Amino acid sequence: MKSHFRVIATTAAFAGITLLATACASGTAASTTADDPSSSQGAAEGRVAVSYEGGIAVLDPETLEVLQEFSTEEFTRLNTFGDKRTVAVTTSAGFQMLDTADLKLTDLVFDAKTAGHVVAHEGKTVLYDDGTGTTTVLDTAAFAGGYQAPAETSTYTAAAPHHGVSIVLRDGTLLTTVGDSNGRSGAAALHPHDDHWHEEAVSNECPGIHGEGTAANEVVVFGCENGALLYANGEFTKLTAPDSYGRMGNAFVSETSPLVVGDYKNDPDAEGYLLSAVTLIDTEKQSYEVVNLPAEVRYTFRDIARGPGDLAYILSNDGQIHVLDPASGKLTDSYPVVDPWQGPAEWQDAHPAIKVNGDIAYITEPATNSVHAVDLKSGKILASSEFDFTPNELAVAMG
């Protein structure tokens, strides 16, 4: 298969970027000058963004004080861009860039019919438009000189639009999902060649493919409805779930560990979004195991993160963070953080979420309109803030 490959060398040529006028609500801290985007870089690294109905707030990572608030749509998603300052906000218009350093919801929007996944890896950040099947590849450092349309970028458009995801590896390989409006079947590995993408490998053994993660040695894992799909050394390998329907929809990874933790669901008709088991994958041994969690530990797709020691941290609806050792599949510790909570009626509904930066976990508690910062090595709550809004999506501006 050959697919068209475009490199766009001028700002004017990139019709996929739109400048939008956006409303900014007043905040508690003055922003630094936007003429020097690096002026506040050091102080701003790791700032936290939370979305709520109709708005986004940027928080100080240590005190959790609101630094600035911005008006936006009723529901938006927040995605780390990978440059230690930018958060990509998914809106109905596309991907809008939020500058957490200079505290600006910028006018730079990458048009998308249905803005989807954002993946940052090895100096490239990839935006995926579900509505057109278009992958847009950007340099992660594209905004070092300011928030203007990049002078050069590349795109790939899938054979048919679908809810997908793409990632670019160190050697330039583009891994992207395969599917159409009726479903998703697998993934392809593509290389740029002249003005085309050249297919080097493809797998159709991953029905319902969703979510991706990159483990040690750039082994990429995708979730399937009957297991997982690995890509390494130019080849795809299918790992099969123990159940005929065994869906892994999200991969929680550390790029320094060969071990992957995934969510797991084995009943397609189950009501609700709380899950009770996890997938453990050893990418070196190419092994796949499902571990059932204790009865008190239930979570959603927002409630697992990797952290210190390459361990996994599960924010359970019993109000505790449970520490999971991916090597043994055992829970080794637990830290009480929030009150017990119920699963959401719809996945978009505000419910507790966890994001990790270094040793610190940031936890939302919608029931109390709060965000907490937790030291994952000790379980100590370092800071808590209560707001006049209900936090929903959560992102940390990391590199």
Image (cartoon, helix red, strand yellow):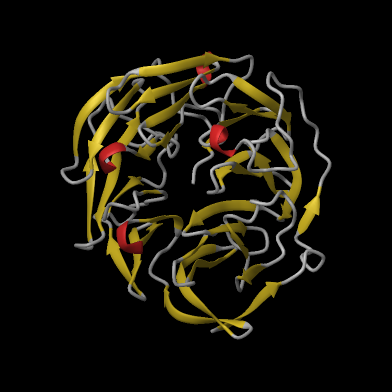
x, y (%) of residue 322? 28, 29
Report the residue at 47% width, 15% height from top: 384
Give the residue displayed 73% in from the left and 71% down from the top: 9
State the image quarter where residue 47 is shown: top right
Q: Quadrant of the rendered structure where residue 217 is?
A: bottom left
Looking at the image, is 313 positioned above or below residue 167? Answer: above
Q: Is residue 128 left or right of residue 250?
A: right
Q: Nearer the viewer, residue 80 or 275?
A: 80
Decide: is 290 above or below 220. Answer: above
x and y, in percent, of residue 258 in the image: 26, 55
Q: Is residue 187 left or right of residue 24?
A: left
Depth check: 35 or 71 in front?
Answer: 35
User: Looking at the image, which residue sits at the far left?
Assistant: 328
Q: Is residue 347 visible?
A: no
Q: Position of residue 303 (x, y in %)?
A: 40, 34
Question: Which residue is at 60% across, 86% downward?
Answer: 194
Residue 103: horizontal and vertical position, in percent? 68, 33
Q: Quadrant of residue 29?
A: top right
